Image (spheres, rainbow, N blue to C red):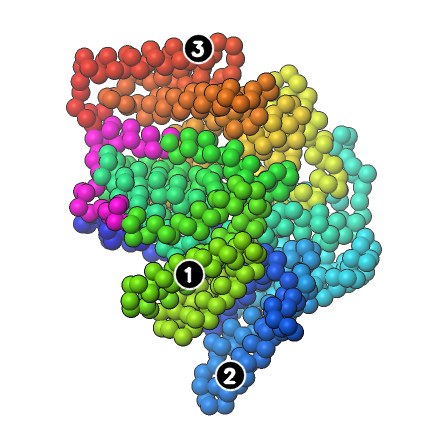
Amino acid sequence: MTQAAGTATPAGAKDEALLPPAANPEHGLPESFGEGFAGRLLFWIAVAFSVFQVVTAFGIPLDRDFLPGVDLIRTTGAAFGLWAGKIAADAARGRSVREALLAFVPLLVSYLILARFAGGVPSQIVRAVHVGFLCLVSGGMLAVHRGRGFGRLFSWGIGAAGFLIGLYHWALYYELVNRAGELTQADFVVGILAIAVLFALIWRVMGPALPIVAGCFLAYTLLGNYLPAPLDHRGYSLEQVIEHMAFGTEGIYGVPTLVSATYIYLFILFGSFMEQAGVIRFFNELSMGLFGASRGGPAKVCVASSALMGMVSGSGVANVVASGQFTIPLMKRFGFSPAFAGGVEATSSMGGQIMPPVMGAVAFIMAETIGVPYSDIVTAAIIPALLYFGSCYWAVHLEAGKKGLHGLPRAQLPNVVRELTDNWFLVLPLAALVYLLFAGFTPLFAGAVGLALTVVLILGTAIALGLAIPVLRVVFWVALALVCAASLWATVALVTAVVAVLVGASLFTGKGRETLAGCLVALGDGARQALPVGLACALVGIVIGTMTLTGIGTIVGTALISIGKDSLFLALVLTMVFSLILGMGIPTIPNYIITSSLAAPILLKLGVPLIVSHMFVFYFGIMADLTPPVALAAFAAAPMAKVSGFRIGVQAVKIALPGFVVPYMAVYDPALMIQPVAGLDGAGYWVAVAYVALKATLSVGLWGAGAVGYVLTAMPWWERLLATAAALFLVVALPVTDEIGFALAALAIGIHVWRTRRHPSPVGAA
């Protein structure tokens, strides 16, 4: 968002908008690798991490010949040999080789890890090395930004220990597979260390909440046999617990870690490269041009840009800090209260996790957990996401009318037509991603192609700028497009070959080398942004492992089923409350995994469709970050709004109220999430979808009017109550409630219009 500030920030607002960079609220560490030797080493470790993830995600066999007797492993090995020779030659001439060595060593380690399994890295190794890199990077971040003296050495040491544990799995992979279930003394020690290192790092990086929750589950595996029935289990030895949690695919290296090491990391890199390409700036400029001049323009820009950014990033709390440094001071400058400005930013940014096509990390975990195509998750999220952002926009519009606020001067805003004409091509990788997702390709393949095309776009732009004759630029882009299309038609490996050729060509131009440096920054940023997600996925695996080992999920499920037999609504409320309470201390990902493991299967047994039951849990995991008293997203906005996080949380809940209502509507009418409805198909089904979408839209509008107290003019308390009652009846799925809701809505709207015409009041009188 900050990149748009130069075109839209009014006089006097710049000093307030240009706040110093804030720490990431999810882990409290600055969004940088630091300075000096340690900072540069950490940066190159992060780049090596991303290289490992990209190679494994693309799944290209490195030992396959692309020329007779020539494969990628040998070619890359030869390149490292030449690089080492150059470093030695530079050192002999007295030139500085520190930066070259800092890059060479981590990248060589990554190459050697990949080279051992050149035909394809086994999934277990991908998971173990992924967690190992996460530990090393997070330990390095702690050392650089928080460490002093011994504390710095300790942080590097514990991070290195985590990485060495990953290498233990890599080095002994075949032995571990052959003796699965039978731990040696060394295995036992490594398993204990793996759990201890993970707990220690996450406690220091993300705080105590998640380690305490996971620790309680771990303690249950060891001590649960002493509890009274029905909470007890048969009892497990320490060796059994370690084998289950630290080896195999049920604990630390379970499904959440698999998803983190594949889909999530790849899409984080996709967002990082899209930002490097200028897509985020493009979306910000479009939002400014489209909505900046309208009533309450700055806040509407915040909502629109968050929705567009959510299409490529899918992050939540971090977006509050990234965009809020510009939007919150600007909203305050134009008359919105600090609490409302912070609430708009928090609500809009959290909505990025539910905005297709690139939703939050939870969506990928959901698709993998319940075994449905990711495109089905995206389809289910379309209408609720539009309702969510529509409600945010509506709340801003009403609040601006209530306060008599206007938009930004048109002269200070970007020209939308010119912006589209100049930069339309930036969305092509996103368009390709959407097409591939809905064409039935896996998210991994779609993400790999989207990432490759984004890199092609970045490098191709740098090369094209070096062509002085416009006709040559046109010929270059047409040829590049045809080559990419032909490569994609054949295999993704050829797309990467196109990237490799562009990288080689970029090395010979100044602009190209500058662009390559930007790509390295994007690789490093991707690794840093993956820390909170990856660490949470690894530790929450202990929770999943406890459930698979002890069956505690069945015990809790039996209790919920007994409640749900009498009242599905009560079971839904209990699930919501549990998710909100759990979300007060832990991030959205572990919240979803824990709650869905316990509650979603029960909702399914009570007749709630599969995707709807998981989306219900997902939505309230997001709402937890907006709900006081903790409200992580609200507190992230507090320093920029200069008001308490609690007050921002109250405003965020008012703005995001439909986020609490829509999941209930979807449970009672799955057509809202475009899910099958018994007895409906063809045109009748789509009429039902249109009807429930219309009903939900009207309900959202009435909720907003009741919450803000303004539409055409200020609303007295009884009119607000009438609007709220109409919205409530439209939500409740009981006989004749729709009819009552529509009647009350017509009455509320009619009275408000009649009263406004009879007693017009000046704008902003309220």
Foreground mark, 1 or 2?
1
Q: Residue at x 30, y 63 (%)?
A: 471
Mark 1–mark 2 distance (CA, rounded to whole Å): 35 Å
Q: Which residue is mark 3?
A: 739
State the residue in front, 14 or 279. Answer: 279
Q: Position of residue 260 (x, y in %)?
A: 58, 50
Q: Residue at x 42, y 30 (%)?
A: 387
Figure check: 643 above or below 167? above
Q: Earlier in the sequence, mark 1 or mark 3?
A: 1
Q: Residue at x 52, y 10 (%)?
A: 735
Give amino acid for label 3. Glu
Q: Quadrant of the C terminus?
A: top left
> Callout 3: helix, strand or loop?
helix
- Can residue 542 be seen by looking at this rendering? yes
Q: Position of residue 403 (x, y in %)?
A: 23, 30
Q: Position of residue 275 (x, y in %)?
A: 40, 54
Figure check: 269 above or below 766? below
Q: Earlier in the sequence, mark 1 or mark 2?
A: 2
Q: Is residue 399 magenta?
A: yes
Mark 2–mark 3 distance (CA, rounded to whole Å): 79 Å
Disc 1 crowd rating (10 Å Cα; few below 14, some 14-19, many 20+) is few
Mark 1–mark 3 distance (CA, rounded to whole Å): 60 Å
Give amino acid for label 1. Ala
Disc 2 crowd rating (10 Å Cα; few below 14, some 14-19, many 20+) is some
Give amino acid for label 2. Lys
The label shown at residue 86 is 2
